[in-house]
């Protein structure tokens, strides 16, 4: 069985390995493409895997802290 082309919110979370609030933040700031179908968010798998920051193995800790700081988090 092949992986579905369209993912629901929880599947996108698993793929990106992030929390629900982080994924919602990324949807709202436009860094993660998504669309609504009914009440739920949907994602194209190909768009998520094509994101530059998803393809990178790991972001430097300083960059992660800088981004978190801009969002008011530490």
Image (cartoon, helix red, strand yellow):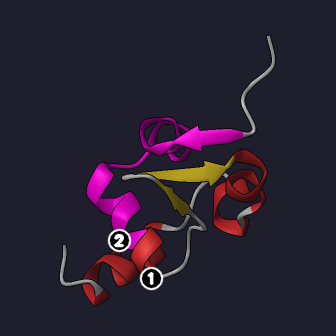
The segment highlighted magenta reads: 6-26
Circles 1 and 2: CB atoms closer than 8 Å: yes
Q: Which mark is drawn over residue 29?
A: 1
Q: Splitting the image into 4 quarters, where does residue 33 fall?
A: bottom right
Q: With respect to residue 43, does 22 lie above or below?
A: below
What residue is at 55 percent from the left and 76 percent from the top?
Answer: 31
Q: Is residue 64 visible?
A: no
In the shown orientation, is residue 15 left or right of residue 51? left
Is residue 18 magenta-colored? yes
Asked if residue 7 is among those painted magenta in the image, a careful observer would answer yes
Quadrant of the frame with the N terminus = top right
**Distance between the Cα atoms at labels 1 and 2?**
6 Å
Q: Looking at the picture, how far across and down is residue 7, in whole percent?
A: 59, 40
In-front residue for pair 62/54: 54
Q: Residue furthest front?
A: 38
Q: Is residue 16 left or right of residue 50?
A: left
Q: In which quarter of the image is residue 23?
A: bottom left
Residue 74, x across and y down, in percent: 19, 73
């Amino acid at each position: 069985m092949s992986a579905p082309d369209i993912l629901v919110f929880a599947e996108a979370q698993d793929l990106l390995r992030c929390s629900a609030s982080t994924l919602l933040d990324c949807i709202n700031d436009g860094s993660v493409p998504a669309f609504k179908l009914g009440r739920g968010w949907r994602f194209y798998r190909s768009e998520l895997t094509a994101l530059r920051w998803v393809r990178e193995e790991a972001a430097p800790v300083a960059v992660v802290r800088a981004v978190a700081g801009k969002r008011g988090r530490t």
